[in-house]
Image (spheres, grey):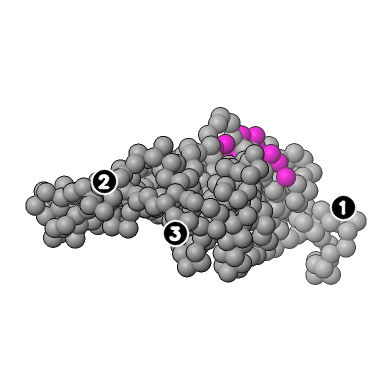
Amino acid sequence: MANKDYYEALGLKKDASEAEIKSAFRQAARKFHPDVYKGADRDDKFKQINEAYQILSDPNKKRQYDQFGSADGMDFGGAGGAGFNGFGDIFNNFGDMFEGFGFEGFGDIFGNARGASAGRGNVRSKGEDLRVDITITLEEAAKGVDKLLSVRRFEKCTKCGGSGSKDGKDPQICNTCGGRGEVRQTRQSFLGMMSTVSVCPTCHGEGKVVSSPCTDCSGSGRAVKSKDISVKVPAGIRSGSKLRLSGEGNIGQRNGTNGDLFVYINVKDHPVFEREEDDLYMKQKISYSQAALGANVIVKTLFGDVELKIPEGTQPGTSFRLKGKGMPHLGRTGQGDLYVAIIVNVPTDLSTEEKMILEYLSNIRGEKTEISKKYNNIKEKIKKLFI
Ligand SMILES: [Zn+2]
Ligand SMILES: [Zn+2]
C-alpha cells in the first residue's frame, strides 16, 4: 500500500489507545465503505484502513510496527510482507467490528476478492508465524555464523497425515455452504437491496468439515514437535535485526500452509569494541615514552593483529583510523573502519632508579616535581647510574 502510515490512515495520533483505534476504524470503515464512498481511490482507501486496523489492533503487530516502522519481514532487503494476510483477515475484522450494529453488506467485495485470490471454498488455513530470539557475539556478527535452533512448532499430525480425520473419510464437503466456504443472502438494508456474502459459519470458509476427528490432534491435523533448524546469520548483522525463514513457522490446520519463522538477533556488547553502524571504536594503552618518542604497537582487531604506527609526540586521546577493520557491511562488500583512541598509561610502580631518571629529565626541562626535595645532588647520582 502506498501510504504506510497506519496511524495517519485512521486519523490517529501515535499514542492512540486501543479504544481510540477501534473507534477510529469504525468511523473510517463507515465513511469509506465502497457502497458509501464513491471516490476514485475507494478500493485502495478501504483496503488501507483495513490493513491499518489489522496491524494496530494486534498488540504484536503494533509493537513491531511501532518499533520498525513496518510490519514486514526482514529489515534489510527482505522478501515480501508478513503483515497483511489478504482478504480473509479483512473479513475477520469486519466480522468482529460490525456485529451488533446492524450494518451489513460487505460481503460482495470480500466474496469477490476471496474468489479471485484464494479460490472459493478452498481457503487453506495458514499457520502462525513464530519468533525465536538468539544472542551472538560481536565476533560472530563480524564473520557470520551458522546457528542451530531448536524450535517447538506445529507440524503435520502423523496419525492422520494432516487431514484431521479419524477414519480417513473426512474432511467432507460442508453441507451449509456446499463447499463454497461462504453463504450468500439478499436482503434489504438502509443502503438499498444488497446481496451479502459472508463466511460460512459451519466450516469457517474452508468448505470442508471434519465430523469424526483424529484422536491425536482432535481434528486440527497438526501436533507440536521439536525441530532443529539451522539459520545462517550473515556477517555484519546488527542487534535488533530479524531474519525471516520462510515457511518454517507453524503449519496451518488440516494440511494448511506454513507460517514463517522470524529469528531476532541480539549482538552481545563487547568488552573491547564499541560499535556505531559499521565502524568500531576501541582504546589502546601506550606508555608515556611511546607517546613521546613514537612507536609501533600491536593492535588486536576482530580480524587479527595489526601494527599501528604511533608518531612521535602523540597526545592522549588522539584517534587513529584503521581502514576496513570495522564490521562488514551487511549484504554488500566492504567493511567499516576501526578507530583506535590512544590512552597514555601513567605508571604507578616506578622504581627508585626510574624516579631518579624522570626527576633528572624534569630538571633538564626546568619542571618542578614533588620528588625534588628528596634527592640532593641528583645529577651526581644519575651520572653514577649510567656508569
Ligand atoms: Zn491427527
Ligand atoms: Zn461451509
Residue at 67% in and 57% down: 11
What is the crowding at mark 1: few (fewer than 14 residues within 10 Å), some, or many (at least 20)?
few
Q: Quadrant of the N terminus?
A: top right
Q: Which residue is mark 2?
A: 179
Which of marks 2 and 3 precedes in the sequence? 3
Residue at 62% in and 38% down: 336
What is the crowding at mark 2: few (fewer than 14 residues within 10 Å), some, or many (at least 20)?
many
In terms of secondary structure, where does tag 1 sit? Answer: helix
Asked if residue 68 lies left or right of residue 260, the reply is right
Determine whether the beta carbon of the residue marked 2 sits less than 8 angstroms from the nearest atom of ligand 2. yes
Query: Is 231 located above or below residue 379 in the figure?
Result: above
Q: Which residue is mark 3?
A: 95
Disc number placed over residue 133 in the picture, else none? none
Q: CA distance from mark 1 to mark 3?
A: 91 Å
What is the crowding at mark 3: few (fewer than 14 residues within 10 Å), some, or many (at least 20)?
some
Q: CA distance from mark 3 to mark 2?
A: 20 Å
In terms of secondary structure, where does tag 2 sit? Answer: loop
Q: Which residue is mark 1?
A: 364
Is residue 159 located in the magenta-colored stretch of the structure?
Answer: no
